[in-house]
Image (cartoon, grey):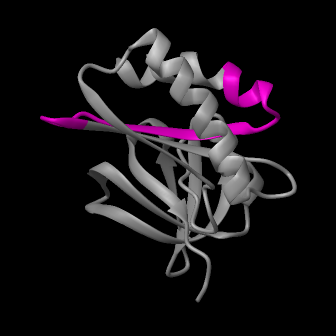
Amino acid sequence: MLRDTLIGLVRPVVEGLGYTLWDLEYSPGRGNSFVRLYIDAEPGITLDDCERVSREVSELLDAADPVPGQYTLEVSSPGLDRPLRTAAHFAPYVGETVFVELAHPLDGRRRYKGPLRAAGAETVEVEVDGRSYVLPISGIRKAHLAPDA
C-alpha cells in the first residue's frame, strides 16, 4: 500500500527534524494526488515548522518519486480535533471526548461520540448516553478528538 511506503520514507526525515509524524493521508487523484502530513511536537507546531518539514519532505519525494503523477503535499499540525488512528494515538486522551465512526455497525450503530474511557492495544472504550461500548481499533473508519465547544 502506497500510504505505508510513504510513511516509511518520510518518518525518518520528520523525526530527524525533531518532530513526530502523527499521521499521513494519501488520496490518489486522476490528475493530481494529495499527500497530507500531520506533524506534532511537545511545544506545539508553528507555520515555520510546517514549512521546514514541507521543504525536506518535498526534496525526498522528488528524489524517490513514489507517488505516480503529480501530487500536492500539505503539512500541518493535527490540531485540537486531531485524528486518532492507532492505539498510541488514543492512549493519551483517556477522559477526553472523542468521535469514532466504524466501518461496519456494531450493535446496530456506527457512530459514537463521548468520553474515551479506556484505550488498549486493540480496542477503545467510549461511553455514549451512559453506556460503554468497546470498539475494535481495526474496525474504525475514522476517529478524532471532539473537544467541547
Of residue 14 and residue 121, the one placed in the foreground of this image is: 14
Q: Position of residue 98 (x, y in %)?
A: 56, 66
Q: Specify the quadrant of the image occupied by residue 39.
A: top right
Q: Position of residue 35 (x, y in %)?
A: 40, 37
Q: Specify the quadrant of the image occupied by residue 105.
A: bottom left
Q: Is residue 17 magenta?
A: yes
The boundaries of the magenta stretch are 12-32
Q: Position of residue 82 (x, y in %)?
A: 58, 59
Residue at 50% across, 81% down: 129
Viewport quadrant of the N terminus: top left
View extreme (bottom): residue: 149
Residue 120 seen anywhere in this rendered image of the structure:
no
View extreme (top): residue: 64
Q: Position of residue 130 (x, y in %)?
A: 55, 79
Q: Is residue 53 above or below residue 44?
A: above
Q: Is residue 19 magenta?
A: yes
